[in-house]
Image (cartoon, grey):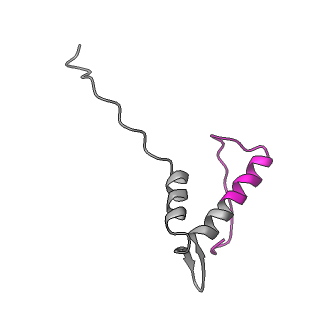
Amino acid sequence: LGAFNPAQPEAAPAAAFHQLFEEQAERTPEAAAVVYENDQLTYAELNERANSLAATLRTSGIGRETIVGILAERSVD
């Protein structure tokens, strides 16, 4: 039995993207996170906008594990 299913230690869970992004925003809040043509957003600005969008989605009844499509014109927004 052990030969077919050797015991392997569980790998540490990888950090979720939003956690990694929040950490980056804390480390380098004034660094450019998004650049499009002549516009740019810093990590602090992008994080603020992402949190605002998340709050709007939550108040609309969108929860965890819900897939949401977002249609937007190409821009820093």
Q: Is residue 56 above or below residue 76?
A: above
For the point 55% across and 57% down, the residue is 22
Relative side of 3 to 38, left or right? left
Relative side of 71 to 31, left or right? right
| Farthest residue, direction left | 3
For the point 80% across and 48% down, the residue is 59
Q: How many marks?
A: 0
Position of the N terminus, as image quadrant, is: top left
Please name whichever residue, 69 or 18, is drawn nearer the observer in this view of the structure.
Answer: 18
Residue 41 image offset from top left, x and y in percent: 60, 75
Please name whichever residue, 77 or 12, is drawn nearer the observer in this view of the structure.
Answer: 12
| Farthest residue, direction front | 27
Q: Is residue 54 magenta?
A: yes
* Res 6 quadrant in image: top left
For the point 65% across and 60% down, the residue is 50
* Res 52 quadrant in image: bottom right
What secondary structure predominates along the stretch shown in magenta? Answer: loop
Residue 61 image offset from top left, x and y in percent: 78, 43
Magenta region: which residues? 51-77
Residue 26 image offset from top left, x and y in percent: 54, 62
Residue 64 image offset from top left, x and y in percent: 65, 41
Relative side of 7 to 53, left or right? left
* Res 36 quadrant in image: bottom right
Please name whichever residue, 76 or 43, is drawn nearer the observer in this view of the structure.
Answer: 43
Q: Is residue 50 above or below residue 36?
A: above
Position of the C terminus, as image quadrant, is: bottom right
Q: Is residue 73 magenta?
A: yes
For the point 35% across and 36% down, the residue is 11
